[in-house]
Amino acid sequence: MARFTDEELMRKVQEGFIVESEADMTESYRKALINQITVQGDTELMSAPAYWMASKDAPSTNTMVSATAIIQDELGHANIAYRLLQDLGVDTDALLYDRPPNKFKNPFGFDQPIANWAELVSAHGLYDRAGITLLSDVHRHTSYGPLKRALVKVGMEENFHLRHGEAWMKKLCEAGGEGRDLVQRAVDWMFPMGVEWFGMPDDRKHHNAQLDFKLKGMTNDQLRNTWLKAVVPLCESLGLEVPAHSDPDTGEVELEYGFPCEWDADDRVWLYDQPITWDQVWERWRARGPMNEEFVNSVRRSRGSIERMLAA
Ligand SMILES: [Fe+2]
Ligand SMILES: [Fe+2]
């Protein structure tokens, strides 16, 4: 029997109570927490094959080391998340190896191929910024003690990924020519992916267990705005075009297209003149992007053969 009712626990965490173990949880709290950490772990894990794909395009030994160090960090972050799930009684072996690939909960952006160095560093500049935005909010506000402590290391490493990405975006843009064009093309398809990353707008989401149980502090729209206020000025300062602008006085950012809109998966372009509904976005997300199966299989690949060796 749980120590608290949902209402009691909601009130307690809003007053600063920190949950340390399952004994302090209600079933709804546990469910919301497991869902949140699964999204976190899956996103970290699937970023690794996505980044690996493009790291082969690293322009030097040094940059190859940086790119692979980031991948190692991401796998470590995934490990932290899945380890936390184990403490909550989740069978992470089944989660990793028996789940159909389309049930992984990573964002649509990590179902896409990252094709070259310019796309990789832009992904660090835009997607790792999305990760930092989400996780630093969780770190600041979460009522779950073990997650709060684990995110200290994750946050420091994510900051390195972001700085690496931004510094390289700048380097390529300042060099001009083909490098600049490649970054522009990367941002063209990644920017709206980033806007979608934060999910449904607040006016469509009436009940939110993660906010009620203080598993996070900011709403989807607040998180999206935080990301936009960092990414749009960055792109503007590099002379990159994005379908948004920031007000230099207030810092507020305004999108210049009807969000959400249609994605042309064949040509990898956003059709800004074709707004769609959130039901259609969900349909696209559920259908998954082109690399979903390959990325999931790539992290499972050698398990069978190693198991056979160990059993021999
Ligand atoms: Fe990460
Ligand atoms: Fe990262």
Image (cartoon, rainbow, N blue to C red):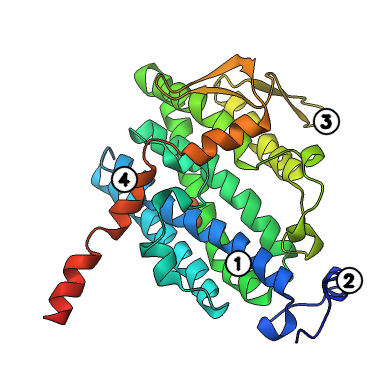
Taking depth in this image into account, of 170 and 71 the one nearest to the observer is: 71
Give residue 251's position: percent from left, percent from top: 77, 32
Which residue matches tag 1?
34
Asked which secondary structure carries label 3, the reply is loop
Q: Quick one: which residue is furthest to the top in this view?
A: 273
Is residue 248 left or right of 311 when viewed as pictured?
right
Of the residues under marks 4 and 3, which one precedes in the sequence? 3
Of the residues under marks 1 and 2, which one precedes in the sequence? 2
Of the residues under marks 3 and 2, which one precedes in the sequence? 2
Q: Quick one: which residue is furthest to the left in this view?
A: 312
Q: Is residue 21 visible?
A: no
Taking depth in this image into account, of 191 and 35 the one nearest to the observer is: 35
* Quadrant in the picture for the C terminus: bottom left
- Circles 1 and 2 in contact, beta carbons < 8 Å: no
How far apart are the two marked residues, 3 and 1, measured between alpha carbons?
38 Å
Give residue 119's position: percent from left, percent from top: 40, 33
